[in-house]
Amino acid sequence: MLVTYLEASRDLCETDSILFGAALAVCRIIGAKVSTAGRATGHSSAIPVWRRRIEERIAKARALIGRLICFRSGNNRPRIVRTVRMAFAGTNVSLSQPDITQKLTESIDDLKQRIAAWGKRIRRYTKRSTRFNQNRLFQSDQKRLYESLERPMVSGTGPAPNQADTVAFWRGLWSEPVNHSEGPWTEVVASQCAGITPMDPVIITPDDVAEAVRRAPNWKSPGLDGLHHYWLKGFTVCHSVLARQFQEALNQKSLPSLFTTGITHLVPKDQVNCLGYQLEATSE
């Protein structure tokens, strides 16, 4: 069935839609969970689950310390008493025993030590994660690593930039035609390159497509189409169609916007300037 649709595909966009539909159908047949948040993934900077879990423990422990201190100071409101009883549940400690003040102090000290240990664990994990990310970034992009070390991340505290002004600012830089200066040296370079033998035409074969997707990670964050490399590996019948359509795009010197459009994140350079942004273009 997939072969029939692929043979009728006219361009890369149609092929991409067919493959995405096939992948979605497979997921529904096997009962796999499919995200309905959209085909394009967003830029995420969420707090790790382990850190959020420890921070919740710290918040609960601090709240309990406050209740215990209130009870030790003579506050006998029902809510406070109920919380203290729950804290001492299963410890054979009664709120009416003579040394309850000492028990409260010991419990408060124990909670403070736990909070200190949890905080140290967060700092240790954060330090290890930072070191790991820096080592990995050193292997892939040393320039970016050194820039991050010299210029820490800045979060703008001023007013948010106006969307229309921001679009107009960058459109004026990227979309306006530019007249380049054609000096005499360009003619000299052109004459020197006239004798260079042109490169042989590139022929894309199904084996080339298979080899390209073979080295690609299976479940790495997909692009705007939302199609993971796993499906390109599994749907081997699409390799010949992709090879033919990529060859046509190469000969026509044109690619659909699906392959040239990405998500651009605007990072503020300082805390005042609203339009002076450093661009970090990522295709997700």
Image (cartoon, helix red, strand yellow):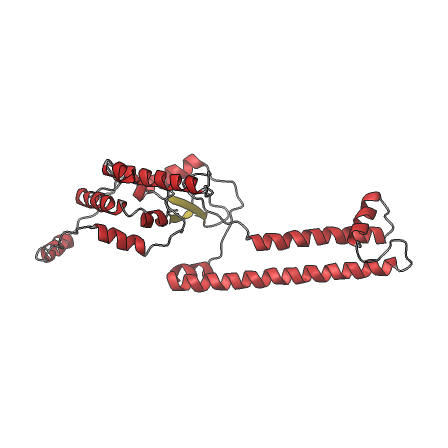
Residue shown at the point (43%, 46%) measured from the top left: 266
- Residue 282 visible from this viewpoint: yes
Q: In the image, 20: left or right of 149? A: left
How many badges with numbers are in the image? 0
Q: Position of residue 138 (x, y in %)?
A: 41, 64
Q: Position of residue 46 (x, y in %)?
A: 53, 49
In the image, farthest residue toward the right: 98
Q: Quadrant of residue 96?
A: bottom right
Q: Position of residue 124 (x, y in %)?
A: 58, 64
Q: In the image, 165: left or right of 253? A: right
Q: Say above or below: 123 vs 21.
A: below
Q: Quadrant of the N terminus?
A: top left
Q: Say above or below: 256 vs 67.
A: above
- Residue 225 visible from this viewpoint: no
In the image, 148 versus 106, the foreground residue is 106
In the image, 276 versus 69, the foreground residue is 69
In the image, 186 versus 50, the foreground residue is 50
Q: Position of residue 196 (x, y in %)?
A: 10, 58
Residue shown at the point (84%, 58%) measured from the top left: 92
Q: Quadrant of residue 51?
A: bottom right
Q: Quadrant of residue 253?
A: top left
In the image, 267 versus 248, the foreground residue is 248
Residue shown at the point (38%, 48%) measured from the top left: 282
